[in-house]
């Protein structure tokens, strides 16, 4: 529905909207739409906003939390706002990986006791 609107109303900012769509699809884990948007983005790879959105996709897929934060600082226009929506989820993933690397054999109940004392 929204894509039909983009097609019917030409805009100078259509590439920026495409980059926002890519970021939104990554945040919502919308694999069907992101594939379509990534195919369209390949034709506009030289645009800064598209390059940034593709780098964010790579950071999310590789679970690179630090790189995601660096990309969030350099996000063009409203990309930063969209990226902030995903930040709590990404932090939970990073914490889960961190705890799994530190305490691979500790039970959740044991960890809760350790954290509560």
Image (spheres, rainbow, N blue to C red):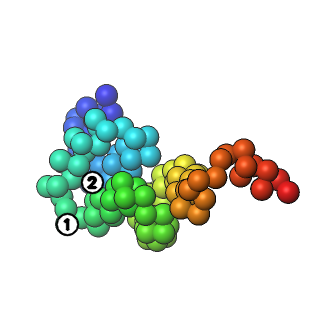
Instruction: Please indicate, yes or no, whether residue 82 appears anywhere in the rendered image.
Output: yes
- Residue 14 image offset from top left, x and y in percent: 27, 50
Camera-side mark, 1 or 2 = 1
Q: Image height check: is 93 above or below 45?
A: above
Q: Residue at x 37, y 58 (%)?
A: 62
**Is 32 or 100 nearer to us in this picture?**
100
- Kindly indicate the quadrant of the structure image that contains residue 32: top left
**Is 68 or 20 nearer to us in this picture?**
68
Element on which disc 2 rests = helix
Specify which label sits upstream in the sequence, 1 or 2: 2
Q: Residue furthest top?
A: 1
Give the spatial CA distance, label 1 vs label 2. 11 Å
Around disc 2, counting alpha carbons within 10 Å, would you say few (fewer than 14), some (14 to 19), or many (20 or more)?
some
Element on which disc 1 rests = loop
Q: Residue at x 30, y 49 (%)?
A: 18
- Residue 57 image offset from top left, x and y in percent: 34, 55
**Is 17 or 111 nearer to us in this picture?**
111
- Residue 1 image offset from top left, x and y in percent: 31, 28
- Residue 35 image offset from top left, x and y in percent: 24, 42
The disc label shown at residue 67, or none = none
Residue under numbered circle 2: 15
Q: Residue furthest front?
A: 105
Q: Residue furthest left?
A: 43
Around disc 1, counting alpha carbons within 10 Å, would you say few (fewer than 14), some (14 to 19), or many (20 or more)?
few
Q: Residue at x 48, y 69 (%)?
A: 66
Q: Image height check: is 1 above or below 39?
A: above
Q: Residue at x 56, y 56 (%)?
A: 104
**Is 14 or 67 nearer to us in this picture?**
67
Instruction: Please indicate, yes or no, whether residue 11 appears anywhere in the rendered image.
Output: no
Residue under numbered circle 1: 46
State left or right for residue 7 relative to residue 84: left
Quarter holding the C terminus? bottom right
């Amino acid at each position: 529905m929204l894509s039909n609107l983009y097609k019917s109303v030409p805009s100078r900012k259509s590439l920026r909207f495409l980059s926002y769509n890519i970021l939104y699809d990554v945040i919502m884990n919308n694999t069907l739409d992101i594939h379509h948007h990534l195919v369209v983005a390949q034709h506009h790879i030289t645009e800064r906003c598209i390059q940034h959105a593709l780098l964010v996709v790579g950071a999310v897929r590789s679970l690179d939390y630090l790189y995601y934060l660096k990309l969030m600082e350099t996000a063009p226009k409203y990309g930063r706002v969209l990226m902030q929506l995903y930040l709590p989820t990404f932090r939970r993933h990073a914490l889960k990986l961190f705890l799994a690397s530190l305490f691979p054999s500790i039970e959740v109940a044991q960890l809760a006791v350790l954290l509560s004392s």
